[in-house]
Image: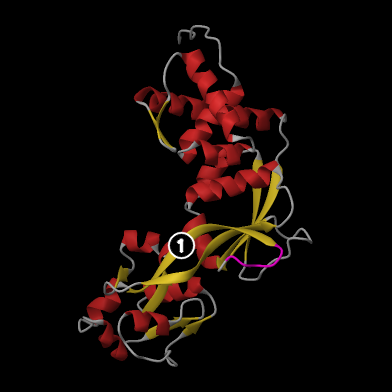
Amino acid sequence: MRSPLPLVRLPPLNGLEAFEAVARHGGFSKAADALSITQSAVSHRIAQLEWLLGVRLFVRVGHSVSLTAQGSEFLAHVRSGLDSLRSGLVVLGGAQAQVIRLSLPPALASNWLVQRLGGFQRRHPEINLEINVTSRFLDFRSGEVDVGLRFGRGDWPGLDAIELLRVRIFPVCSPAYRNAHPWLKTPADLARATLLRQAVAKWKPWFTAAGLDWPEPRSGPSFSEVALLIDAAEYAQGIALVLSALVERQLAAGTLVRLFDVEQESERAYYIVTAAGEAPRPEVAALVDWLRSSG
């Protein structure tokens, strides 16, 4: 039988939450934004926690902070305890599950979000996500969506936009396609290759970055969705021009390989968007905060 732990006076919960938030965001300012309190309030809670524990949890250098060895060890216990408490509240019905409607395009959903969803569910078991995968811009005012992920310049009327992912653009193909076309040595060799097309990433700007004065291709399969373009490249149907954030998994797994060293910095990015001029519900703020930390 396991021996009971000695009774120890627990520090205030808001101090533990502040400690976890500062550790997660790497600074007091971002932690304050996540907790919807002032930076001075975060500093006060951390100072009180350190005084109660009798140890330093952070090393402060200018505007940045890092965990001490004792802080790193303590963090694992704090996160486990907070997660367990949240789960317990849900089980006992003390916290009614909240619903958030998240909208995002198919390629970002399948190639970026799904690999990370478990982290949000572990951190916020009290929140249910309704995920709408669509390339259509849904209406925030009608309640179709609470949070959206969009690709663009961040200037949508009536919406607040926070940059999530900057992207680079480069060509990829499957190992089988590259092996079947061993003459693919330089960008100029693309003149003989099958180029897969999609409206999100046009070929001509990348041609220019590669020093090629070529027009936009008019031949080769054209896809309405980026996700299909990536699938076609994996199935050795040709060479695709892709956004870096959407092919991390395929490059790591070796189902796609990069061609050449030339890449184009996109003027657009993926953004988190919410309705402008409205204070977000706590559960919406929690999702936005998690997305920002995952980007």
- Quarter of the view holding residue 92: top right
12 over 215 or under it: above or below: above
Q: Which secondary structure type mostly characterizes the magenta part of the structure?
A: loop
* 151 relative to 65 in the view: left or right: right
- In this orientation, which residue lies closer to the viewer: 150 or 127? 150
Question: Percent from the top left, x then y, of residue 110?
Answer: 50, 61
The percent coordinates of residue 82 (x first, y second) are 56, 28
Q: Is residue 115 magenta?
A: no
Q: Residues within 10 Å of mark 1 (few under 14, many from 20)?
A: some
Q: Residue at x 41, y 25 (%)?
A: 71
Q: What secondary structure is marked by label 1?
A: strand
Above or below 292: residue 172 = below
Residue extending farthest to the front is 62
Where on the picture, by quarter, is residue 193? bottom left
Tell me what residue is drawn at x 73 percent, y 61 percent: 140
Observer-nearest residue: 162 or 138?
Answer: 162
- Range of the magenta residues? 154-158
Camera sees residue 238 = no
**Residue 154 location (% of width, % of height):** 58, 65
Image point 71% across, 33% down: which residue? Answer: 95
| Image-quadrant location for residue 93 | top right
* Residue at the spot of label 1: 166
